[in-house]
Image (spheres, rainbow, N blue to C red):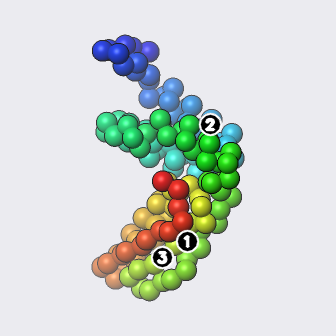
Amino acid sequence: MAEAKNTVLFPYETLHKLCMDAFQKFGFSEKEADIIQDVLLTSDLFGIQSHGMQRMVRYHKGITNGLIKIDAKPEIVKETPISAVIDGHDGMGQLLGHKAMEMAIEKAKKSGVGIVSVRNSNH
């Protein structure tokens, strides 16, 4: 741990482990925890702290209060060869965004265009 100008720096590996442990204890699978931590830590590494690890407290509160559903199953409510709409059913935003990204990439590979939107998601 190093300190510089009122900032405490932690090794990436320490924060990675903290995120993985926390999200798995919240109830997410290891794969899901890995997707979530990747988004949070990448945000922090790019200096976008508003979307980094500081959100963990908010996510814990959202899960505890039932606003974020750990077991939410995304549902494709509309789909065309180039587009789709996913209802996230109050699931974790990083997981829903990842699913939408994968779908959009597959659609783009097949048709040249891929547009996927998500509704009822958490941040």
- Local secondary structure at mark 2: helix
Residue identified by numbered label 2: 22
**Tag of residue 63:** none
Residue at point 55% right, 80% down? 77
Give the CA distance from mark 2 to mark 1.
26 Å
Residue identified by numbered label 1: 87
- Local secondary structure at mark 3: strand
Residue identified by numbered label 3: 85
Labels 3 and 1 touching (C-beta < 8 A): yes
Residue 14 to residue 60: above or below: above
Give the CA distance from mark 3 to mark 2.
30 Å
Give the CA distance from mark 3 to mark 1.
7 Å
> Badge 1 local density, few (<14 within 10 Å), some, or many (20+)?
some
- Local secondary structure at mark 1: strand
37 left or right of 106 in image: right
117 left or right of 60 in image: left
Q: Position of residue 41 (x, y in %)?
A: 43, 38
> Badge 3 local density, few (<14 within 10 Å), some, or many (20+)?
some
Say what amino acid the circle numbered 3 marks: Val
Say what amino acid the circle numbered 1 marks: Asp
Q: Position of residue 37 (x, y in %)?
A: 50, 42
Q: Position of residue 113 (x, y in %)?
A: 32, 78
